[in-house]
Amino acid sequence: MPVVLEKANYTYMPGTPYQRQALNDISLSVEKGEFVALVGHSGSGKSTLVQHMAGLLSPNSGQVLADGISLIGKKPENIAARRKVGIVFQYPEHQLFAETVFEDVAFGPRNMGLSEEEVDERVRQALAFVRLAEDGFGQRSPFRLSGGQMRRVAIAGVVAMRPDYLVLDEPSAGLDPVSRNIFYEETRALHKETGAAVIMVTHSMEEAIQLADRLLVMSEGKIILDGSPGEIFRSNKKELLAAGVDVPDIVALGDCLRGHGLGVSENCLSSRELAEELYAMLQQRGGSYA
């Protein structure tokens, strides 16, 4: 069963001069196994939406469910439903607090009431998953690691709880290209190996088109577009620009090439695909790269 929002509305600071409606009658369903990218201009409601999906905020009206159970409330079933959703915030390394990497990653599983044997197994598996083998990093201070390593520790803490739905709020912000690529690989592997749904907030259209199979575009607290990234970026350029969202560079380059008479396919949505198609066209014309 999915995570579902049903006609969810949320207003910050209601009844004050600073009142702002962040969610406007949102209805949304995300199934297990999906990889969803959520994009929109700053202030469009993206972070508010995913905080509702993780049960951190409660809608003023409407409801949020995980596998048919409300995320709101203090009953055991509500708590269990919230544990199905893990969230990694922007700059998650700021949330590290324990003396060792092992203890930081173990915090969530211990709060779930697991035995120490199960906690130990989950921590080891989570650290191995993010390429920080426990015997190499487990007893080190998280505050003596690089920025990219600290972020991977924070992600391992969520992975160790084995959520069915993983929310990533601007997860690659501030990472260098190498750390960003490692993060991409780990996220793809997590999605493939566990079958967990991934909901990723991003300002990078390249991330959206490379990683996600479903794209949600938000504007003024509403979801205005919902579909495959390729179809939305190909067919909804005016709507995207009106919402303050740029198309990926690779899509813009393809449009430019077609505008200059090169018949490249609109289905080229990565640099590799575009390069291969251009190479094939060059070969057909008897040319070479030399």
Image (tube, rainbow, N blue to C red):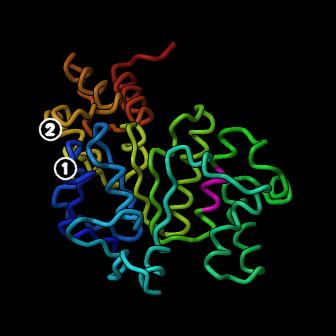
Q: Which of 50/73 is in front?
A: 73
Q: Which of 51/135 is in front?
A: 51
User: Would you say the magenta stretch is mainly helix, strand or loop?
Assistant: helix
Q: Please report whichever mark, 2 or 1, sits nearer to the chain's N-terminal start.
A: 1
Q: Are marks 2 and 1 in contact (CB under 8 Å)?
A: yes
Q: Which of 92/242 is in front?
A: 92
Reply above or below: 218 against 120: above
Looking at the image, the residue that sits furthest to the bottom is: 76
Name the residue: 55% across, 34% down.
174
Circle 1 Cα neighbour tier, 10 Å, few/some/many (<14 / 14–19 / ≥20): some
> Could you say where residue 8 lies in the image, as x and y percent from the top left?
22, 65
Reply above or below: 200 against 172: below
> Could you say where residue 159 lies in the image, as x and y percent from the top left?
59, 64
Label 2: which secondary element = helix
> Could you say where residue 77 lies in the image, as x and y percent from the top left?
43, 86
Name the residue: 65% across, 41% down.
148
Kind of residue indicated by mark 2: Glu
Circle 2 Cα neighbour tier, 10 Å, few/some/many (<14 / 14–19 / ≥20): some
Q: Which of 290/114 is in front?
A: 114
Name the residue: 17% across, 67% down.
7
Rendered image: mark on residue 58: none
23 in the magenta segment: no
153 in the magenta segment: yes
Disc 2 marks which residue? 239
Label 1: which secondary element = strand
Disc 1 marks which residue? 225
The magenta stretch spans which residues? 152-157
Position of residue 66 in the picture relative to residue 265 (left or right): right
Q: Could you give the CA–CA distance between mark 2 and mark 1, rounded to whole angstroms?
A: 8 Å
> Could you say where residue 256 lies in the image, as x and y percent from the top left?
25, 20
Name the residue: 37% across, 21% down.
282
Kind of residue indicated by mark 1: Leu
